[in-house]
Image (cartoon, grey):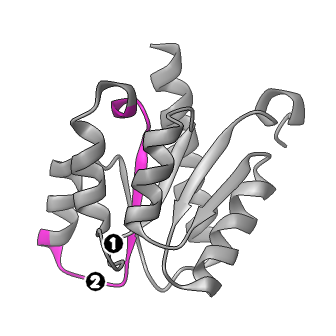
Amino acid sequence: MPNDRTHSSKRVLIADDDPIIRRLLSSAVTSEGYTAVVVEDGRAAFRMLQADAGFTAALFDMRMPGLNGIDLIRHMRTEKRLQRIPVMLITAEQDLRVMSDSFAAGAVAFLSKPLTVDKLQTGLRMLLHSAQTHIAA
């Protein structure tokens, strides 16, 4: 069970163009004791990151209007202050090349749709563990 005092100031950025997926991701993040900051596309996520690099982790949809998840990660990796934020990409694509491209761009986790609560919670916990490990290093 998460310690609310430990995680109450920790925020996870969520970018997805599907309102149902946004709600599901947000619910999973808050159930882990983190604050979800939700935007509708990659450009809005990048603007948010430009204004505030203080996110613990990020969850991005692979296919979004404006700026897709892989390109968003590539932009993040060009800025030192954003490089420490671990990102999990979420996609309906089953192509292994997409997964490979995601990791090459800098994603630390990859989650395929359809999402289940168990799969999402497991992936989210891996991502948040990665964030804690990265902060401690």
Left or right relative to 80: residue 118: right
Left or right relative to 92: residue 21: right
Which numbered disc covers residue 106? none
Residue denoted by label 2: 93
User: Of marks 2 and 1, which one's residue comes earlier in the chain?
Assistant: 1
Left or right relative to 92: residue 36: right
Task: Give the crowd class for mark 2: few <14, some 14-19, many >=20 residues within 10 Å.
Answer: some
Camera-near label (2 vs 1) is: 1
Q: Any magenta on residue 89?
A: yes
The single residue placed furthest to the top in the displayed view is 137
Amino acid beneath label 1? Met
Query: For the residue labelled by badge 2, is the local secondary structure a helix, a strand or a loop?
Result: loop
Image location of residue 118, percent across then percent down? 64, 70
Residue lying at 70% horizontally and 36% vertically, measured from the top left:
10
Image location of residue 101, percent across then percent down? 15, 60
Magenta segment: 82-97
Q: Any magenta on residue 102?
A: no
Which numbered disc covers residue 62? 1
Amino acid beneath label 2? Glu
Image location of residue 62, percent across then percent down? 33, 72
Left or right relative to 14: residue 80: left
Q: Name above or below for residue 92 compared with residue 7.
A: below
Query: For the residue labelled by badge 1, is the local secondary structure a helix, a strand or a loop?
Result: loop
Q: CA distance from mark 2 to mark 1?
A: 9 Å
Residue lying at 39% horizontally and 65% vertically, measured from the top left:
42
Image location of residue 55, percent across then percent down? 56, 38
Task: State if disc 1 and disc 2 touch (CB < 8 Å).
Answer: yes
Residue lying at 35% horizontally and 46% vertically, measured from the top left:
108
Residue lying at 86% horizontally and 34% vertically, measured from the top left:
3
